[in-house]
Image (tube, rainbow, N blue to C red):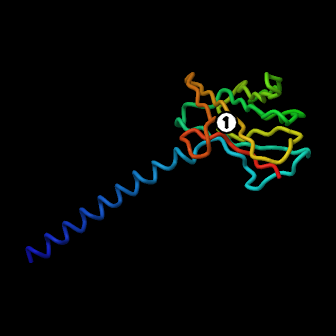
């Protein structure tokens, strides 16, 4: 009977450790998924008018919210405007090297909807990173401007 109880206790411990490991492993990839991404999974045609929607989720908990989100639109694209959304104002401004900034600034509220849309005329075929700067209400900033395999990947739009 003693051997049987020992095995049973070890099995319970093993199951408990496996469950704890599963919780830890489930939490680790979450940060890799929580970055700025295009909501469409396909590609868009070259030299065409498109409405782009990016999701920039809040990842710092229930009391820290996005306060500003800026997208750097690559050269070769023209921006036709940004879609207004409740609690946010948006603006389009030109920068150096033919790039354009699309900036969303929270004007009120704490809605966690991280979807932002704007119109563009696409450039020639290719893969285009859209550097994204995410500012939070705690005055921290996250830059999504790295290569696809980095910890801070920029969203990439495929133009065909």
Q: Quadrant of residue 132?
A: top right
Q: Residue at x 75, y 27 (%)?
A: 103
Comparing 105 with 73, the one in front is 73
Comparing 96 with 64, the one in front is 96
Q: Residue at x 79, y 22 (%)?
A: 96
Which residue, as the protein is rendered here, is positioned at the far left? Answer: 2
Q: Position of residue 93 (x, y in %)?
A: 82, 23
Q: Quadrant of residue 10?
A: bottom left
Instruction: Give the quadrant of the N terminus.
Output: bottom left
Q: In screen coordinates, is 155 left or right of 9?
A: right
Q: Quadrant of residue 151?
A: top right
Comparing 84 with 119, the one in front is 119
Comparing 122 with 104, the one in front is 122
Q: Secondary structure at mark 1?
A: loop
Q: In screen coordinates, is 47 left or right of 158?
A: right
Q: Position of residue 82 (x, y in %)?
A: 84, 34
Label 1 neighbourhood size at 10 Å, few (<14), some (14-19), many (20+)? few
Q: Residue at x 86, y 39 (%)?
A: 119
The residue at which mark 1 appears reads as 111
Count of marks, rendered view:
1
Q: Position of residue 69 (x, y in %)?
A: 69, 30
Q: Position of residue 57 (x, y in %)?
A: 63, 40
Q: Residue at x 57, y 38 (%)?
A: 152
């Amino acid at each position: 009977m003693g051997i049987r109880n020992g095995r049973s206790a070890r099995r319970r411990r093993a199951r408990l450790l496996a469950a704890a490991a599963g919780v830890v492993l489930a939490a680790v990839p979450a940060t890799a998924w929580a970055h700025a991404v295009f909501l469409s999974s396909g590609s868009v045609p070259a030299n065409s008018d498109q409405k782009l929607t990016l999701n920039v989720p809040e990842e710092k908990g229930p009391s820290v919210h996005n306060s500003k989100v800026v997208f750097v639109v690559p050269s070769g694209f023209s921006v036709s405007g940004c879609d207004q959304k409740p609690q946010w104002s948006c603006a389009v401004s030109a920068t150096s090297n033919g790039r354009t900034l699309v900036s969303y600034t929270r004007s009120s509220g704490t809605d966690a909807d991280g979807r932002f849309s704007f119109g563009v005329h696409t450039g020639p075929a290719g893969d285009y990173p859209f550097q994204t700067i995410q500012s939070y209400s705690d005055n921290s900033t996250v830059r999504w401007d790295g290569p696809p395999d980095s910890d801070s990947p920029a969203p990439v739009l495929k133009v065909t």
